[in-house]
Image (cartoon, helix red, strand yellow):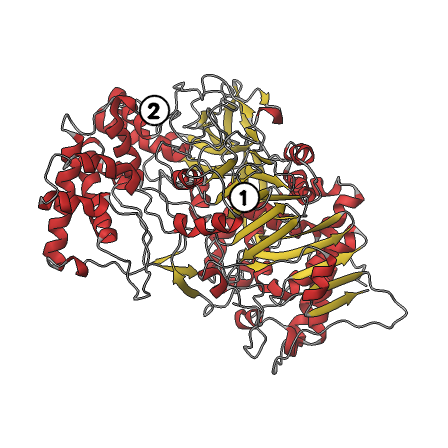
Amino acid sequence: MTSTRPARSRRRLALATLVSLAASVGSATSYAVPSRGPEAPAKVTITRNAYGIPHVYAQTTYDLFRGYGYAVAQDRLFQMEMSRRSTQGTVAEVLGPQYLAFDKDTRAGADPASIKAQLAALSKEDRDVFDGYAAGMNEWLATIATDTTHLMPKQFLDYGFAPSTWTGYDVAMVWIGTMANRYSDSTAEVANLKVLQQLTAAYGPDRGRTLFDQLVWPEDPLAPTTVPATGAVGTPIGTGRGQLRPITPGLDDAADRAMARSGGGAWPQSAPTASNIWITGKDKSADAKSVLINGPQFQWFNPSYVYGIGLHGAGYDFAGNTPFAYPAVIFGTNAQISWGATAGPMNVVDMYQERLDPANPRRYVHNGAYRDMTVRTETIHVRGAADVSYDVLGTVHGPVTSVDTAQGVAYSKKRSWAGAEVSSLLAWVKLSKARDFNEFRDLAGKFAISINWYYADKQGNIGYISPGRLPIRPANQDVRLPALGDGTMEWTGLNSPTANPLSYNPAQGYLANWNNQAAPGFNNDYGNWSVVDRVDQITTALASRRQFTAQQLWDLNQQFSYADLNLRYLAPTLATSVAGLPATDPARRDVELVTSWSGQTRDTDGDGFYEGPQPAIMRAWLPLLFQAVLADDLPPEVFAAYAGAGYARPVEQTSVRPAPGTKLVYNALLGARAGVPQKVDFFNGAAPASVLLSTYQQALAQLREQRGADMSGWTVPVARINYSAKNFLGIPQAGADETIVGPQYANRGTENNMAVLGQGQARLCLAAPPGQSGFIAPDGTRSPHYADQLELYASFSCRSEELTMAQVRAAAVSTTSLF
């Protein structure tokens, strides 16, 4: 039973109760399990396996998600508490004034009234997803209150505050703040404007714009796409030149800050894009009808970014895992179909430059008249300090992200998916019920945000859709730059979902993605998609043979994870530079060190160093190459974005991509054959092969001087994976001592999963480190499932997940009943 008090009263009660009961702690044993007399049949049964993965059984949607929320609260209560606070801007309330600026940014980008209105408009069945989940969380909170000595997560005691009760709104906001706002809210338009201004200031408007087009191209027709080139083609983006005002150097825009916090890198790779997937259908799969392998690269965290779950009842019958224990399980299978996801590439966000009234900076020009900005006053409670009130501003386009006072403008963000966050989440929740591609496609059509969806089924059909509401933009809008906010660059509507990229059973027999372009013509302002793309690692491997077994497809993960992502684009030209030399010539032998190298950057003997001198050579060579080819053609502040080799740092948390400089150099190597017109010759008339050779030889000379002539000393220590105790927004989600520096870095998924269907089988195998549970008892005792998937993951193994009731029962280690 749960209380019927109003939500605010329940929250105050829970806080008061838990704070008082947490005053004394003792030794930990195990979770308390609710009990009830035999006269009351259980409404929810939660069965856990040897890895602590819960399978929830219930007859109604409310009870099914109640059981889900209950299990999540047992395993991840502190992580979820901080996720909720991170996405609603209430971190300073419990951690103090150092998080005040973060909370302000978070609230400025949210629209609580809209989300609450969307929830209120739901049917009871849909609302039960959120309310049931929240009720389950609160039910475990009530259990904690009866035994804080053993059940209160230690992190609450260490940070000195108590968990609070949950509502359906909280459940929705975790998804909105960590998925929609992280992966469907990217824009580089303001950053691009800064770069264009730097280029034109250095070289004048004509050459500056020419260079800009060569750095931030509208479309590269040679870029690999997930939809084969024979598939759908989007509308080319406009390249109009609106009369934008200059941007003040150093302007700090909230949209840029949000991308940086969300895992984006420095411009031109500022958007948080990471994840890979490869799927084979009936003609490409040797021992199944379909195989789907997904590696979502959310970065690495402790507790794990994803949560394993099985839901059975009320029309659901599946298993999988999902970030932040969302109600929508985005990686999984129901034995009929399997599904996965990678970061969204659709252009669903625009920035607008709003011209302000000189007499009142809270008014802006729109359709020939001044309009008042919307104003919402927010009050932030700050631990150890006075409350802080401030105003959140908005225009007809959306929230104001920055004000450039010197130029008399503001920047605002317009999202095509605003107002459809909850319906998008529910479409994803219901995806697990789909039984065929038609149902899958119908649900994708209801999904307004941009995330790539993938499909495979037991008959051997495979498919891909990149959903998201696509605006119909005016022809005079260059989507790489902010639009004019005066009414001359307004969207004229939204495209039908049928216009989105789609591929079903492509002739090649497989689908692959590593955050590359979705389909020809579907570009955006931040993708910078190029003929240089890491997805080439996947597609080259899949095209190399007629069929693969499921195990062979799984083993490819190691090959992709350790691949040097720059080598394939530079080695052929470097090889031509010495092709005429005798095989015994020292210069040729030096070059063949890398041109004959597999590109596999591994530590096979476990000595803590990558094998061979090649990793050291590549890390020394690329910066010299970029300096020689690019530095004289770009302003220093722009060249800095292309100077680095881009390899993993000693302790790494992010996914790596080909160096931005490699994209420019490779296009320059292609010359007239490049998909991006090369109007500025970065080689300045020199023979490209000779430039590559001379810089390569400089790198070798540098290494000989620094490390000696014996190449066995040219070693590079292996990078290590960092499992951060802070979430991707930089907010603590575990104790300060819970960061884990893990195994050798591999450019792979935060978790990896494989679904194998057909030919009489339905299998799901996963590895999601560190473990299922983040629970630490008051005395410091950790859950047995705190890190029990770490070695599984490091060895590129996986654990089998149960799909049928018989399998769940056979694997059961514990069972909990809720009444």
Front residue (pair 750, 91): 750
Label 2 with label 1: CB-CB less than 8 Å: no
Quarter containing the C terminus: bottom right
Picture coordinates of residue 503 (x, y %)?
A: 56, 30
Mark 2–mark 1 Cα distance, whole angstroms, equals 36 Å
* Residue 250 appears left or right of 90: left
Query: So how many labels did they put on this image?
Result: 2
Q: Position of residue 476 (x, y in %)?
A: 45, 17
On residue 675, the disc is 2
Badge 1 crowding class, 10 Å Cα cut-off, few under 14, some 14 to 19, many 20 or more, is: some
- Point out which mark residue 286 bears: 1
- Percent across and percent down for residue 264 are 42, 45
Tell me which amino acid carries mark 2. Answer: Gly
In terms of depth relative to the viewer, which is nearer, 362 or 178?
A: 178
Which circle's residue, 2 or 1, is located before the other in the chain?
1
Residue drawn at x 55%, y 36% as measured from the top left: 283
| Amino acid bearing label 1 | Ala
- Between 524 and 391, the residue placed more toward the observer is 524
Task: Using the rendered view, name the quadrant where residue 544 is placed.
Answer: top left
Residue at (47, 68) in percent of width and height: 738
Residue 151, quarter of picture: bottom right
In terms of secondary structure, where does tag 2 sit?
loop
Q: Secondary structure at mark 1?
A: loop
Which quadrant of the figure contains the N terminus?
A: bottom right
Residue 13 in sight here? no
Query: Which numbered disc, 2 or 1, marks the residue closer to the eye?
Result: 1
In this rendering, the answer to whether 367 lies above or below 363 is: above
Q: Is residue 134 above or below residue 371?
A: below
